[in-house]
Amino acid sequence: MKKILIGVPCYNEEGNIDLFFERLSKTLNKIINFQFDIIFLDDGSKDGTWEIIEKLKLNNGKYKINGIKFSRNFGKEIAIKCMLERAEKYDYFITIDSDLQHPPELIEELINISSSTKNRIILTKKTNKNSNFLRLFTAKVFYHTFNLFSEFKLINGLSDFSLIDNKIVRTINSFKNNIFIFKTALQSVGYKPKIIEFDIEEREKGKSNFNFIRLIGYAFQTIYTYNSPFIIKFNLINLSFVILFSGILSLFSYFILPHLLKNIFIFFIFLMIFWITVSIMIITIYLVSLTKEIDRKPIYIIDEEV
């Protein structure tokens, strides 16, 4: 009987875990020929999330449930990395959020697809019908820009909700970088994934902690960790564009509109200052990321396990 570890990262989810586990159990009860273990990881919650995880372990008799509690909030990506390190003795690893925006009922389809195909990676893609316009637009710009300069392509709209086999688990665990982005890591290994779509459900309780500022940070971490040449390429293209554009404006102002030369010159200076500012910002973020990468402190600290 093949074994599957289901990893559930949690942050301030005391209002959702019980209902999540109820729906998860109903789904797993219908799946035969697999042994399921479940690990809940409390990523430094400030509510009663950990107490609920402890109760689930004590009161559940059918599935093996383990809980890990971080000493503080290290972020969802690090939580997944921690659970991946526990998944090497399993045949498959599934990660799913506990806020019920990832429907637990879809796990059955993930397993069926994995069993009937040779795909090592089964990913899910959000239909985005509940996402706001600004987030959709910025995500589209980011993925288009990343793919323009990258040696591999990222797929827009993917969710962390996925199933991977043991070979992929071990491959991802062999990555030595401190900065870790789960979805990008899966797409960087070279195996073609199978993708299924699902509708994002509304949160039962609470609100998402993933805001626009975190989204920007997530984008820069992705660029640094999996597409370092982007920094150089982007700045070179930026510089080439400024030089070309300023040259065209200078010629235009000199031969056609000489009386506007002063205004054009001022505009050119402004454009150069803007480009230098953007370049310094990108390089600064790159250096900060590089500092994190060479830092030898642990990337997470476990406060308690059950």
Image (cartoon, rainbow, N blue to C red):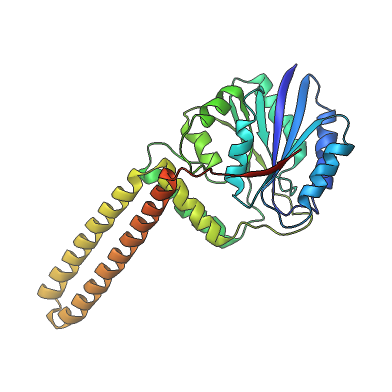
Could you say which is closer to the camera, residue 146 or residue 37?
37
Q: Percent from the top left, x then y, of residue 106?
A: 73, 36
The residue sitting at 61% across, 33% down in the picture is 84
Instruction: Please identify the residue farthest to the bottom as the structure is shown.
Output: 259
The answer to which image quadrant residue 170 occupies is: top right
Quadrant position of the C terminus in the picture: top right
The residue sitting at 69% across, 51% down in the picture is 11
The answer to which image quadrant residue 248 occupies is: bottom left
Q: Is residue 158 visible?
A: no
Quadrant position of the N terminus in the picture: top right
In the rendered image, the vertical position of residue 135 relative to residue 302, given as above or below: below
The residue sitting at 44% across, 45% down in the picture is 295
Q: Is 164 displayed left or right of 103 in the figure?
A: left
In the rendered image, the vertical position of residue 145 relative to residue 166, given as above or below: below
Could you say which is closer to the camera, residue 290 or residue 306?
306
Q: Percent from the top left, x then y, of residue 79?
A: 62, 43
The residue sitting at 29% across, 54% down in the picture is 235
Q: Is 299 displayed left or right of 142 in the figure?
A: right
Q: Is 224 displayed left or right of 95 in the figure?
A: left
Q: Percent from the top left, x then y, of residue 171?
A: 52, 27
Q: Is residue 198 visible?
A: yes
Q: Percent from the top left, x then y, of residue 157?
A: 57, 46
Instruction: Please identify the residue farthest to the left as the structure is shown.
Output: 255
